[in-house]
């Protein structure tokens, strides 16, 4: 069966995690990414960036935890980097990127991280084509990474970014991480290696 080529829209899409049909729409785009990576014989990499040292920054590791618990390690074609136990953060991001390219000859990287935004977008998930710019919200210069970027908007941006991340509501972060991990896991049902395992 020939799988049609799929491309993400030029503009970033925002999903309100509390809206009824948002998860279905997010899952549909993730399904297309799964099918595209399969058609191009690429390993689908979920690079979940963040740290558990600040509430707002643990979005990525929470997503990574949920994915790694459900994705059997023996299955090829998909890999997860970044969990609460083994986080990927500012100090080891560059080394992790090198490790991904050493371990996978043809990776298709979906980079996942928390972000800060305008007040009306708190509780939203963004999905867009192109690399993630990790650390930009806290004025850090880190390597850009990913063919696709997913962010969970956990709080508002401001001058005291580190303090904002430290005081972010855990319920918001958990809600966003559940939304993203659920959407990804549901989309993986369309990957031939995962049928009947998730």
Image (cartoon, rainbow, N blue to C red):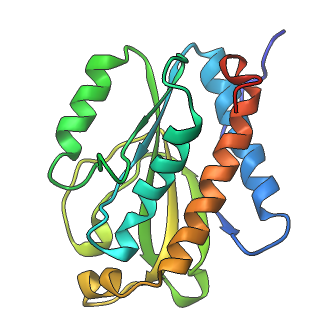
Residue at (37% x, 14% y) in the render: 105
Q: At which x and y percent is residue 104?
A: 37, 18
Residue 10 shows in this picture: no
Q: Quarter of the image holding residue 146?
A: top left
Q: At which x and y percent is residue 92?
A: 18, 46
**In this rendering, would 94 be left or right of 17?**
left
**Residue that sits furthest to the top in the current view:** 1
**In this rendering, would 146 be left or right of 128?**
left
Residue 148 shows in this picture: yes
Q: Up-down: is 114 above or below 92?
A: below
Position of the C terminus, as image quadrant, is top right
Residue at (72% x, 45% y) in the render: 29
Q: Quarter of the image holding residue 13?
A: bottom right
Viewer-side residue, 192 vs 150: 192
Q: At which x and y percent is residue 12?
A: 59, 59
Residue at (78% x, 45% y) in the render: 28
Q: Up-down: is 173 above or below 68?
A: below
**Residue that sits furthest to the left in the current view:** 91
Position of the N terminus, as image quadrant, is top right
Viewer-side residue, 195 vs 121: 195
Q: Quarter of the image holding residue 59?
A: bottom left
Q: At which x and y percent is residue 148?
A: 51, 44
Q: How many marks?
A: 0
């Amino acid at each position: 069966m020939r799988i049609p080529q799929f491309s993400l829209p030029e503009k970033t899409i925002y999903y309100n995690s509390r809206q009824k049909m948002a998860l279905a729409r997010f899952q549909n785009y993730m399904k297309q990414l799964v099918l595209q990576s399969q058609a191009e014989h690429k390993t689908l990499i979920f690079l979940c960036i963040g740290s558990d040292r600040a509430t707002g920054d643990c979005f990525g590791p929470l997503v990574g935890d949920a994915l790694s618990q459900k994705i059997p390690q023996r299955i090829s074609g998909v890999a997860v980097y970044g969990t609460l136990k083994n986080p990927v953060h500012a100090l080891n991001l560059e080394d992790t990127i090198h490790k991904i390219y050493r371990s996978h000859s043809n990776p298709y990287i979906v980079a996942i991280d928390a972000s800060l935004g305008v007040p009306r977008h708190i509780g939203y998930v963004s999905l867009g084509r192109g690399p993630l710019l990790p650390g930009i919200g806290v004025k850090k210069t880190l390597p850009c990474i990913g063919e696709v970027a997913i962010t969970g908007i956990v709080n508002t941006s401001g001058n005291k970014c580190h303090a904002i991340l430290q005081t972010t509501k855990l319920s918001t972060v958990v809600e966003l991480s559940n939304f993203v991990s659920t959407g990804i896991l549901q989309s993986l049902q369309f990957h031939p290696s995962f049928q009947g395992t998730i």
